[in-house]
Amino acid sequence: MPPLVSILIPAYNAGQWIAETIKSAQAQTWPRKEIIVVDDGSKDQTLSVIRRFETSGVKVATQANQGGSAARNMAFAISQGEYIQWLDADDLLVADKIERQMEALGRCSGPRTVLSSAWGSFYYRSRKARFTPTELWKTLSPIEWLLSKYQRCTYMPPATWLLSREITQSAGPWDTRLSFDDDGEYFCRLISKSDGVYFVPEAKSLYRHSGSGSMSYVGQSDKKMESLMISMKSHVEQIRAVEDSARVKAACLQYLQWWSFYFVPSRPDLTRETEKLAASLGGHLQPPRLWNNRYQVVQKMFGWNVAKRAQSLVPQMRASFSRSWDKALFRLGGQNS
């Protein structure tokens, strides 16, 4: 019998997308799979949409709203699969994604090797997804993968991964304290305990850009900034457990420098905490800089707060326009026209 793969989907107020996501899981060509959806106390029609799939074998569980990490932990506790596929409620799997990765298992060193895939981003029309390779689109040892992530501040969405149950259990549960970068912290922790990352370019998943309301957007949320601080500490701890060298400390300082931008000026307490973490690495942080010269001109004219706000809002406005345009085309012609 081929191994059973558990496709685990946490869902909260995802009524607009969840049916498409579940259908992409059902369409997987891998013959043995179970699909588990945990509704995290949604206030929209998410649960009623999920219930329609129960007759086709989808397992549905519910809980009071506790956050995505708690929903994922519940889904994993219910699951029986020898392999785990995480899938967010608005993302999609290309039909042969799991099959391609399962076929690659024979080329891996063992069950503690994790498999990643190529991924494309889209708004509404999944056929228009853009695949933009990064330094993480490679087969890498744990330390080399983590160093690339820290130095370049890049990432891989949850849907890209396929994991054995053994390494998933070894990593421990998702951290329920986190409302931002919960996936970044979790996969950093998991990879630090793995034998390495095996990249399968033929396997593909699709990541939906869902706007400023998504968990991947910090904004001015104190809760998300505090979550980011917890995640940053974990990132530093996990990579130093793998290798505590000068290059690791330098990568950690680079990583802290990037993310400390979000704490200034509204959270001086978190700024001090970040500086203390940098000092423990034998370094210090520079004053945060704006990422584009045009906003540095704004800073000279109107001050840091206005420039920082502009740097955040202008890309959001552009993305909002692109999203609205893509939505109009999606509705006008249909996704598969």
Image (cartoon, helix red, strand yellow):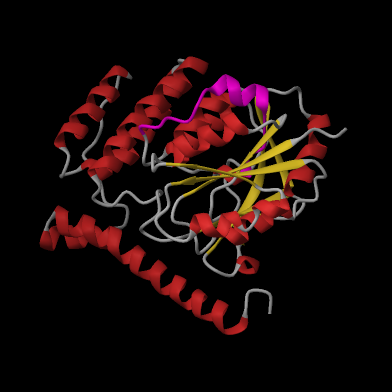
Give coordinates of residue 225: x percent, y percent.
27, 40
Question: Which is more toward the observer, 305 or 21?
Answer: 21
The residue depicted at 39 percent of the width and 56 percent of the height is 43
Residue 100 highlighted magenta (yes or no): no
The residue depicted at 24 percent of the width and 36 percent of the height is 286
Residue 306's place in the image compared with 31, above or below, is below
Based on the displayed image, in which of its 4 quarters is residue 330 positioned?
Answer: bottom right
Give coordinates of residue 79: x percent, y percent.
64, 33
Q: Is residue 286 at least partly visible in the picture?
A: yes
Based on the displayed image, in which of its 4 quarters is residue 91 positioned?
Answer: bottom right
Q: Which quadrant is the N terminus positioned in?
A: top right
Question: Which is more toward the observer, 303 or 26?
Answer: 26
Give coordinates of residue 269: x percent, y percent.
16, 32
The residue depicted at 24 percent of the width and 62 percent of the height is 310
Residue 3's place in the image compared with 201, above or below, is above
Residue 174 highlighted magenta (yes or no): yes
Q: Which quadrant is the C terminus positioned in?
A: bottom right
For the image, the number of numbered tags is 0
Q: Which residue lies furthest to the left in this view?
A: 302
Give coordinates of residue 86: x percent, y percent.
60, 41
Q: Name the side, left or right, on which 168 lies relative to 96.
A: left
Magenta segment boundaries in residue numbering: 160-177
Q: Is residue 148 at least partly visible in the picture?
A: no
Q: Name the side, left or right, on which 331 lies relative to 315.
A: right
Residue 190's place in the image compared with 259, above or below, is above
The residue depicted at 32 percent of the width and 48 percent of the height is 218
Q: Which residue lies furthest to the right in this view?
A: 1
Q: Name the side, left or right, on which 222 lies relative to 154.
A: left
